[in-house]
Amino acid sequence: VAKSSRIAAACALSVLLAQGVTALASAPWWTPAGISPAQAAKYGDAPRWRLSGGFAVENGGHPDAGTPAGVQLIAGSGTQPGVAIAAGASGIWRRDASGRWQRSLVLLPQGLLAGPPKVTAITAFAAPLSNAVYLATDGQGVLITEDGGVSWIRDNLGLPVHVLALTASSRQRTLFALTDSGLWAHRLQSFPAPPAYSPRDLLAHWLTIVLIASFATAGAIVALRKVCQ
Amino acid sequence: MTASRRTTLIFAVTLAALAVTLLAPLPLGDPNGTDPHEIRLGAVVVALVAATFWRDLRPSRPLLLAFAVVVIPFVLWSVSLQVVPWWWPTWPGGAVIFAAGLLQFVITVALIEVLKHNLGAPITLRLAHFGTSAAVFTATGVVLFVAITLALPASALGRVGIAVPAALDALGNGLIAGDVLQAGAQEIQFRGALLALLESTLRPWQANAAQSVLFGFGHLALEQYEGPVVVLIPLTIGLGFVLGWVTQRTRSLWPAIIIHIVAEVAVRVAVIPGLYGG
């Protein structure tokens, strides 16, 4: 029993170690903005899409008669003409480049007795910086779609979940989120290039891994032999 | 030494060897993603099974083979997810996941056949029976699963919403079918082969606890899982224990298979999108 307990403790310790490594690898994407909401609003892009009489209108375009009823928020990325995301009482919708509207996202309840979070803003960079359209919620932070609303992921690493307003600044290459804990900024940046390893480093890396696996196997064989005697 | 104590120790030693093999090299983490951890897990299991042909280790062979039934199909599933897109870059993502799920399922069934017929291992998969109690447990289990996952904080699970176009695509392009095959294979491995084998020497609750611990910690090996491990591991240990208990109670593997399929599809459409990106 004592031996089994020691093995179990070693396993638990290994899991904690793995969690620590994972946590260290997760750097926050959002940081405090360090400016006032009024300043952030001044940087904000002129919207590419707007609503007029309940109809979606893209810059230089005509009101879209197929706009779903009840939408109150709309935005589209500068890189995808004709593509927009809209939200309102009837839900969250996507418009593809051909003008077809389709339900995009159904937000799930936040708990058994709680409703889904309220959508508080939709925004995108008007300049052709990225395909992203951002959707802010009061309870689930910010969601992002990069394929015109076909799929969504969370984009709020480091950000409080109660987001009350959201604006994009192409000039600053920054997204500003007003939350119940102040103003936060997410600055666009390229993914860092993967590090280049020398063949010698890679060899050392692989030999270490092979050694660890070999020791684990040899240790297990010795222990199993004792158990089986 | 009693048979039950011996089984417990063999189980603990093998689990520890796999845990060390998987976790100890993590600090050497390779950002290029060129560290196929599945290969070293598979290699350790194959080496341990091979060692049981040594007379001194022969009593541990059935249980180590049961570990192989769990680990080898997982290794092939995970490796094929990486190799197929590299070899056939034009294959759509859903087709890759379906092919990987099919491979995992076929290899699982084949290994169990080897276990049952060639080695005479005491394995009953409990697939022949689906009575009224199994139907009741299945319906109750599905409802309870949905209620509990809705009651848990969304931030802990990564549950945000269902992207309707992506979910419809997943139904049509083989993603969901791949998940269904994967869920079926895992139930046959854990609540089928491993549980049956452990029950031959341990008390039912001990056998169930052991297989659920391996099921829970096995989720650490999912490389693409970037969510809160601190939630996932206890959750999957608990889910594994409940599914094992239902299997023992109803003497049928079908309720566990159906509940697991519901869970897998729910994770695919509602949880995974919330996990990536924080």
Image (spheres, rainbow, N blue to C red):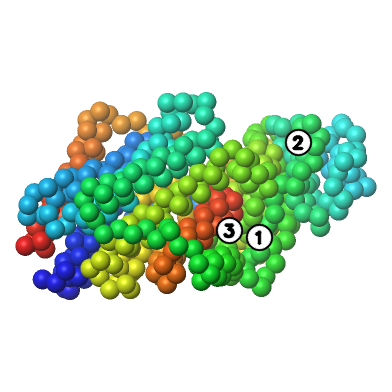
Q: Residue at x 52, y 26 (%)?
A: B90
Q: Which mark is residue A23?
A: none
Determine the residue located farthest toward the right in the rendered image. A53
Question: Can residue A32 be seen from the camera position used here?
Answer: no
Mark 1–mark 3 contact, CB under 8 Å? yes
Residue B159, numbered label = 3
How many numbered marks does the figure carry?
3
**Amino acid type, callout 3:** Arg
Q: Position of residue A183 (x, y in %)?
A: 64, 57
> Residue A223: where, in percent of width, then height?
12, 59
Q: Chain of mark 2?
A: A
Q: Chain of mark 3?
A: B
Mark 3: secondary structure: loop
A6 shown above or below B28 = below
The residue pinned by badge 2 equals A96
Instruction: Decide if residue B217 is on the left or right side of residue A84.
Output: left
In front here: A226 or A133?
A226
Quadrant holding the N terminus of chain B: bottom left
The residue drawn where x is 34% and y is 68% is B208
Q: Which residue is mark 1?
A: A108
Q: Give the quarter of the image for residue A204.
A: top left
In space, the residues marked 2 and 3 are separated at their CA atoms by 26 Å
Label 1 and label 3 in one chain: no
Q: Are marks 2 and 3 in contact (CB under 8 Å)?
A: no
The chain letter under disc 1 is A
Q: What SS does tag 2 mark? A: loop
Crowding near pointer 3: few (<14 within 10 Å), some, many (20+)?
Answer: many
In the rendered structure, which amino acid carries the disc numbered 2? Asp
**What percent of the width, then of the height, locates residue A20?**
36, 58
Note whether residue B122 is visible. Answer: yes
